[in-house]
Amino acid sequence: MTEILKLIKDAFENAKISNTFYEAKKIINKLGLNYTKIPACPNDCMLYWGEDEDLQECKRCKTSKWSDAKENKPAKILRYFPLKLRLQRLFMCSKTVQSMRWHASAEKKDSKMRHPRDSEAWKTFDLLHDRFAEDPRNIRLGLAADGFNPFGAMCTNYSVWPMVLIPYNRPPWECMKPTSLILSMIILGEKMPENNIDVYLQLFIKELKELKHGGKWCFLGHRRFLERGHKFRLSRAKFNRKVELRDSPAALTESEILEQLEGINVSFGKELHANKDVMHIEKNVCDNVLYTLLNETGRSKDIISKLVRILKKWNIRVPDGLSSNISRCVDLKQRKLSGLKSHDCYVLMQQLLPISIRNVLPDKLMKQNLEDQYFGHLKFYVRNKAKSEGSIAEGYVAEEALTFCSRYLERIETRFNRPPRVDDCPDGNYSTHVDSLFSQMGNSKGTFTAFEFDFKDFVRRRSKGRKPSNVKIEKRVNKDFVTWFPTQGLDQESEIPSPKELGSRSSGANNKEA
């Protein structure tokens, strides 16, 4: 990397570029584009941070903190990405600060739900926390977590658990983009943390509390601790327009504090239970439905073979990132489905499965999530398979730095103004009198010649005798056009004529029939 920096410095003589990779990393760290590594118990019991930072073994299971005590190599490491500075950068940049208020400033046209702000849960939260809802700058975050195997099919007993934050202040076309998602932490291990995931959430919760009480320091009722004759007690203009006449609260004794805390049991780790989320519930339901179909008795052979063959034959092209290729998850020999991600289950349950089993089930039975896409994106960061979590963390920080810098570049192609891979927006080179009803979708490629041909007028001229009504002409158009068009020089061995040639043929046909 140092050699690359030297090469760039030689190419751009007037630019201030660091001499070494270490100096460049120091600049990035000042911008908050970094992460911290915190040792953790290999059994997910505790984190070695704060007061427990110097402990050498777990307080619960007594497992050693080190996998190699001589080299001070921790047995397990949590990589945490601090949140405060990442949120501050969203308000520092002029290209993102407006979108952070979109949820409150954008007009709501109807009652349809297009964003979480339109949901009843959002509105109920605003009613319960009206002071929080008053300021549109207050940030509303969504938390998503899931595990994936960073080695693909090479290993099945290892997983990485990234936790991602979604800033719901931003509009729906921005908040779910990879550049808007905030990686909060990376949990490693051969197995999922399950109910012990709350151990790793301690740092995140601590930072959220600091954000909640941050900003302007305001001590409500602090004047009651002053002496009775203090001038601030009677001052209205400098405080909350009220006079403070209350005495200071009495200090609690140790026994009184213990009495208030009696019955409260707060313990991080094994004793807590995590809530089930919709994503995993849907995956479990999908698995149960598939296993029920594949293990059905009686007509099971017929049902299984048809169902598996239908899924195997599917070669449906879907938008980028909508789902994986489900046909690759089908094993025809063992008649099994494996390797389905949570979003694959959603697409399978909602869109594909009802079609595939329409003619398979008995007559009496006939009637996205961002997340997997983004986690698949993180998998591409893995370069060193011996340290997959470190590769993901360093790759994310590097991409985050590029995203941050590209927001300040003008008249240069970046990931924010680069044309999409499939650009189907109209380019304005084609225009007809029916554009207001049927707008052109797609760009023209190469040269082309536009012509207009009214087949309805052609049928009207062919009519002999009494002038037919518009209804009869419409019926003839719908009936005859399909058979007439292939006869205009489009036989099996000839090439498709040019638009100009086809236009002249149609005009000639009109004149001939007229």
Image (cartoon, grey):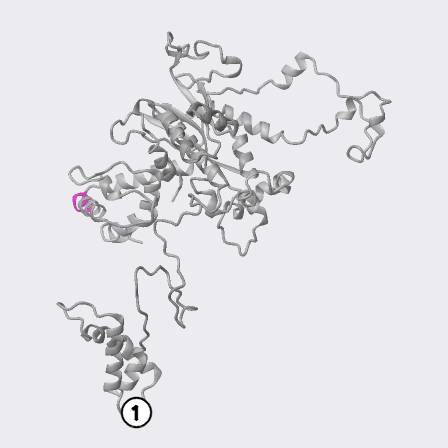
Q: Is residue 289 above or below residue 214?
A: below
Depicted 76 relative to depicted 429: above or below: above
Q: Quadrant of residue 376?
A: top left
Residue 301 is inside the magenta segment: yes
| Quarter occupied by residue 484 | bottom left
Residue 437, horizontal then vertical, whole percent: 42, 68
500 or 370: which is nearer to us?
A: 500
Residue for point 23% across, 53% down: 359
Q: Quadrant of residue 152?
A: top left
Residue nearest the viewer, comparing 489 with 6: 6
Magenta region includes residue 118? no
* Quarter that holds the C terminus: bottom left
Q: Residue at x 54, y 35 (%)?
A: 89
Could you tell me which residue is drawn at 47 percent across and 45 percent down? 174
Outermost residue toward the right?
Answer: 229
In magenta, the rendered stretch is 298-303
Mark 1: amino acid: Arg
The kind of secondary structure element at disc 1 is loop
Q: Is residue 28 left or right of residue 306?
A: right
Q: Is residue 8 left or right of residue 313?
A: right
Looking at the image, residue 236 sits to the left or right of residue 60; the answer is right
Q: What residue did someone put label 1 on?
A: 466
Mark 1 nearby-residue class (10 Å; few <14, some 14–19, many ≥20):
few
**Which is the main secondary structure of the residues drawn in magenta?**
helix
Residue 148: percent from left, percent from top: 34, 31
Left/right placement of residue 263 relative to residue 27 reads right
Quarter containing the N terminus? top left
